[in-house]
Amino acid sequence: MKKLALSDEILLTIEKPARYIGNEINMVEKDLNNIDIRFCMCFPDVYEIGMSHLGIQILYDMFNRREDTYCERVYSPWVDLDKIMREKQIPLFALESQDTIKNFDFLGFTIQYEMCYTNILQVLELSQIPIYAKDRTEDDPIVLGGGPCTYNPEPIADFFDFFYIGEGETVYNKILDVYKENKLKGGTRKDFLEKAAEIDGVYVPAFYDVDYNEDNTIKAFTKNNVHGKDIISKQVEMNMSDTYYPKKPLVPYIKATQDRVVLEIQRGCIRGCRFCQAGMVYRPIRERNIEFLKEYACEMLKNTGHEEISLSSLSSSDYSALQELVYFLIDEFSSKGVNISLPSLRIDAFALDVMSKVQDVRKSSLTFAPEAGSQRLRDVINKGLTEESILNGAMDAFNSGWNRVKLYFMLGLPSETVEDIEGIAVLSDKIAREYYTIPKEQRNGKVSIVSSTSFFVPKPFTPFQWSRMDTAEEYLEKQHLLRAKFNEQLNRKSIKYNWHEAELSVLEGVFARGDRRVSKVIYDAYKAGCLYDSWSEYFKYDLWEKAFEDNQIDIAFYTNRERIKEEILPWDFIDAGVTKDFLWREYNRAINAKVTPNCRMACSNCGAKVYEGGVCFEDRKQ
């Protein structure tokens, strides 16, 4: 058995030592003597969250199918172990081999949300790898990043050797082949990066320079190396039923955030919500074949021992064979005690029928995401939900036995008025009133409604990428206004209101639309003690404010101003598959509260047709 990197003495003093010892079910082990490339995959957050991420499971399986490559994993050490590793100068290590990360060829980060940026620096520093890419030598791993946040990589560009833009199944094998060939020929780090930069989807920040105008907007974004591409094009896996997917996913020994088999039924979304980055950058919608899904569901449940399977998608109701798949899973597994989880469903007769079969109605709650309190604002964001459909869905659920409902809204959406804000409380109250129209003897106890608001953050490659974002003070003012309205409601005892932290959303807004100048702020905040920023108990906004102040960077420049169409945005060099003209058209339709039909109703000419597949080439007669 391999020797653990941490002593028994240390393991006994930290919370959940199973986070660091590896040896999970379905973990891959390889003979290092037969390996040419060592790749360490990192999710820069605590183990339980990272182990729930499907993307790492797919890439882990894909890389380890190569005989010449050994892919291992690392996660951010929790604060207790972080302290010990620094004090005792223990280098960060991979779970599989317990070897030091610094000895690997690659350290690859999947970057799912902006508030993990300081954790990226933590992993680099604990691995004894220079934080800035410019300081790395031939002895250091190549540090790369992928995932949704790389659609604007600029705030963290200085820390990475390269970014991969798009879906991992497409050209990662080519990247590894190029690295292996360069290594065999005795090529340098720069030689490899120049070769990699010629591969579609690869962005090497060091090969580009940014110049700024006097007003701090971007003046020019130019190449300084001929190997860099003028435009970095997102890579997309079009054949979803003949590609990599793990039949033997890793199973942790401790409870992960999502402790279940995850079956991805499709990628992309037809809905076109104007605030949703995923709905734009994952276009076009591509379905997995029903037989593929049936086979993988059976194999994954058999190989993991999990007692729950979740169908993953941005909008599960839009999967064309959903009914057949769900009834197959019920027939095959419900008698074996396997739960079926169906997130992202529209609440209709089919959904209620299915959920009543797979859930304990008396214990479970239903989730609606109206996002906005008024019809006008739902039209602005292109939500495609009317108040009538929301109330009818809730009433159907109440008549089917449910009495617990979760509602999700956003505050701070573009063009929001007091009436829109108060509409959140009014709509919540209307849903409660619907319940009490049921005769008392037919009700399932009292109704419980939990309404939650998050703060709107404009994201790149959405129609709202040009929008002004509220200040923390404005967010809090709106929150207080809404709380007061909830307290006025007749059914206030049936309704609970939850809200998010304003300062966290402001910081997320800076990172979402920031440029390279923000990297120094991230570095200084990390050095001052910022870590696990997405965890409210560790979020230190005062340290962030000081880091911005010390670097003479104005938060409001990135958050609280409207952009004009002609402004060069920090991510304009990336082709994410939706054109800037389409996004601008949608922005103007939003201003005029005009709804755009979903992709199956009509093509809105967004640009995704270039991929020659998926929903773009379906027959729209239906």
Image (cartoon, helix red, strand yellow):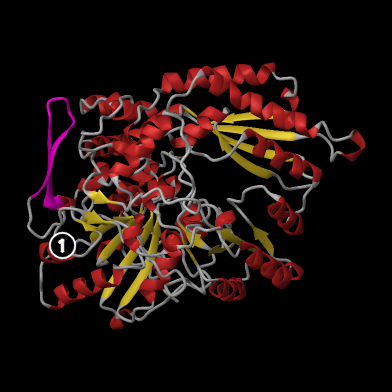
Kindly indicate the quadrant of the structure image that contains residue 393.
Answer: top right
The image shows residue 29 at horizontal and vertical percentages of: 42, 77
Residue labelled with disc 1: 193
Horizontal side of 172 relative to 97 (left or right) equals left
Question: For the magenta stretch, what is the residue range?
Answer: 206-223
The image shows residue 189 at horizontal and vertical percentages of: 13, 64
Disc 1 marks a residue whose amino acid type is: Leu
Let me know if residue 213 is in the magenta part: yes
Q: Nearer the viewer, residue 170 or 622?
A: 622
Can you see residue 355? yes
Prevailing secondary structure class for the magenta stretch in the rendered image = strand
Secondary structure, mark 1, is helix
Kindly indicate the quadrant of the structure image that contains residue 191.
Answer: bottom left
Which residue lies most toward the right here?
Answer: 441
Total marks in image: 1
Horizontal side of 62 relative to 162 (left or right) equals right
